[in-house]
């Protein structure tokens, strides 16, 4: 298994942000878009660009948090593996096995 090498050489496809139609995510996104369009209709023109800016900034924040959560997930997984390999119990004696 050469997963690390495949990851290094970019052969591992990146996770794409997709969602199911009719999902809670899709419904909330649709609601936001409808509200933004409704606001653009009733606000003076000088404020409609603010709505677009807010939407763009929200998208950037989501992208940043997605990356951070992705990295944190890897780190959490590594911590679990380290605990499995190196962790000790406070009350039990570890029996030696053929594998350790």
Image (cartoon, rainbow, N blue to C red):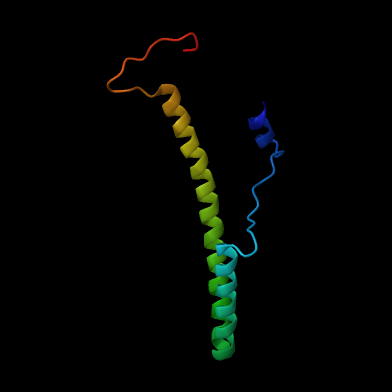
- Residue 32 picture quarter: bottom right
At which x and y percent is residue 41?
59, 88
Left or right, 13 with respect to 47, comes to right
Q: How many marks?
A: 0
Instruction: Kindly give the residue lying farthest to the left in the view shown.
Output: 91
- Residue 81 drawn above or below residue 54: above
- Residue 52 picture quarter: bottom right
Q: Residue at x 55, y 68 (%)?
A: 28
Q: Residue at x 69, y 33 (%)?
A: 6
At which x and y percent is residue 82?
45, 28
- Residue 70 drawn above or below residue 60: above
Instruction: Kindly give the residue lying farthest to the front in the view shown.
Output: 22
Q: Quadrant of the N terminus?
A: top right
Q: Residue at x 54, y 46 (%)?
A: 70
At which x and y percent is residue 23?
59, 62
Instruction: Choose between 95 and 16: the one closer to the eye.
Output: 95
Left or right, 88 with respect to 4, comes to left
Q: Residue at x 28, y 23 (%)?
A: 90
- Residue 46 drawn above or below residue 30: below
- Residue 62 drawn above or below residue 3: below
At which x and y percent is residue 53?
56, 74
């Amino acid at each position: 298994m050469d997963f690390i090498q495949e990851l290094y050489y970019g052969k591992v496809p990146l996770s794409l942000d997709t969602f199911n139609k009719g999902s809670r995510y899709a419904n909330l996104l649709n609601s936001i878009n409808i509200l933004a369009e409704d606001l653009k209709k009733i606000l003076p023109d000088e404020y409609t660009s603010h709505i677009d800016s807010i939407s763009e900034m929200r998208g950037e924040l989501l992208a940043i948090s997605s990356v951070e959560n992705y990295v944190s997930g890897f780190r959490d997984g590594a911590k679990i593996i380290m605990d499995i390999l190196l962790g000790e119990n406070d009350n039990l004696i570890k029996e030696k096995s053929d594998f350790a």
